[in-house]
Image (cartoon, grey):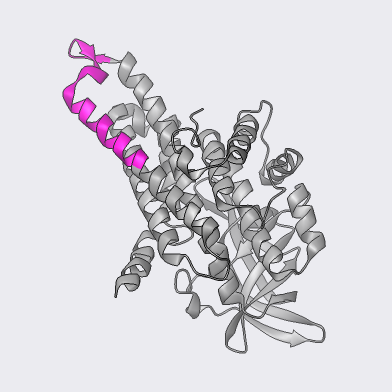
């Protein structure tokens, strides 16, 4: 497996080398993988969830790159625990749930998106009503990663016309079939909930600004796997009397792919480093947007080139390249779609 730390050492410390090695060993483990719950339990046992909500972003990045290179479902299981755990760490609420999430004993999901309120968070219609010492939530969240297996859900809802964050135990969910991942709806019908933070909008933004640039490194892991697999094919397959890798037009494509991979890694790592060195009370929406957008779009181009260079074999349903392309494509939408992030970037200059 390729190292992310070695070629980009300027962003890292020796601790990141160790984190990468542990993640690589986990990613290449033998035996059955199971579903999300099995994977979360295994991640906890391996210590990869010990820093949920409190570790640095570059550690998240190197772990995601290694996990995604081998198995996108391991990456999904890993990062959703962070998405759910960070609001618990920041709010200081529910320490017992957070401890179980770090141990891998419970699955926590992050419930923000709604059918009519994706990137437009202000259009959220889920609402909360006080009920004694707790609240009741009504609404619908969808496209929520790991919802079908979730023991707990961090849910964002309107309270007195402002967005607040709540904890829902044993959420009622419905599965959605999206790219073979564990994704579903969270159905809220006067559902009991506990308040985590009255300033839920700020908490949600802090969570996304922390996790968003790491999406680019997950994309890099998927694209680098496709690139390596494609290079092997180009060196071994001959056309017109010589290996494909010897064809000038193919070499031009290889150069384009290498440039995109370098651009993806450097830009996403810059965004991760920026979040790590910036005071916790300061926003990094601009750099997070650039890191995520640049890396996911570049990696999308790499995998599209991989499909093209494989020819018919690249569009076979069961082929590795087709699988990697399908797994990488949603990353240009999740946690800030490309077109929305362009608006964030433009606002910085306007």
Q: Is residue 17 visible?
A: yes
Residue 81: x and y in percent read 66, 53
Foreground pick, 210 / 279: 279
Image quadrant where residue 169 sits: bottom right
* Residue drawn at the location 48% of the way across and 51% of the way down: 215
Q: Residue furthest top?
A: 241
Residue 331: x and y in percent read 45, 51
Residue 192: x and y in percent read 76, 75
Foreground pick, 275 / 323: 275
Residue 264: x and y in percent read 38, 45
Foreground pick, 125 / 333: 333
Image quadrant where residue 227 sits: top left
Q: Main secondary structure of the magenta part?
A: helix
Please determine whether, in this image, residue 152 is positioned above or below residue 325: below
Q: How many marks?
A: 0
Residue 169 is left or right of residue 181, and the answer is: right
Tell me, yes or no, whether the highlighted magenta stretch contains residue 209. Answer: no
Quadrant containing the C terminus is: bottom left
* Residue drawn at the location 71% of the way across and 54% of the way down: 107
């Amino acid at each position: 497996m390729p190292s992310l730390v070695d070629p980009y050492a300027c962003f890292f410390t020796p601790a990141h080398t160790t984190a990468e090695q542990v993640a690589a060993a986990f990613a290449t483990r033998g035996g059955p993988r199971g579903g999300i719950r099995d994977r979360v339990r295994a991640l906890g046992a391996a210590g990869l969830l010990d820093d949920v909500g409190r570790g640095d972003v570059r550690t998240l990045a190197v772990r995601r790159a290694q996990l995604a290179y081998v198995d996108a479902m391991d990456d999904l299981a890993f990062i959703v625990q962070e998405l759910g755990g960070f609001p618990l760490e920041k709010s200081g609420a529910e320490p017992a749930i957070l401890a179980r999430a770090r141990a891998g004993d419970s699955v926590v999901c992050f419930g923000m998106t709604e059918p009519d309120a994706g990137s437009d968070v202000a259009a959220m219609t889920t609402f909360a009503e006080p009920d004694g010492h707790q609240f009741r939530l009504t609404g619908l969240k969808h496209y929520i990663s790991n919802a079908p297996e979730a023991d707990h859900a961090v849910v964002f809802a309107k309270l007195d016309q402002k967005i607040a964050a709540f904890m829902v135990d044993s959420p009622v969910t419905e599965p959605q079939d999206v790219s073979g991942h564990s994704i579903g709806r969270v159905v809220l019908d006067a559902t009991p909930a506990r308040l985590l933070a009255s300033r839920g909008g700020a908490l949600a933004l802090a969570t996304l600004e922390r996790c968003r640039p790491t999406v680019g490194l997950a994309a890099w892991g998927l694209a680098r796997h496709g690139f390596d697999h494609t290079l092997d094919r180009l060196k071994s397959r001959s056309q017109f009397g010589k290996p494909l890798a010897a064809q000038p037009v193919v070499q031009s494509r290889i150069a384009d792919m290498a440039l995109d991979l370098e651009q993806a890694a450097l830009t996403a790592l810059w965004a991760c480093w920026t979040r790590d060195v910036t005071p916790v009370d300061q926003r990094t929406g601009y750099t997070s947007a650039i890191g995520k957008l640049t890396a996911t779009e570049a990696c999308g181009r790499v995998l599209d080139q991989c499909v093209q260079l494989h020819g018919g074999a690249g569009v076979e349903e069961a082929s590795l390249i087709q699988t990697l392309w399908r797994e990488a494509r949603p990353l240009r939408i999740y946690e800030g779609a490309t077109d929305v992030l362009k608006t964030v970037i433009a606002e910085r200059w306007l």
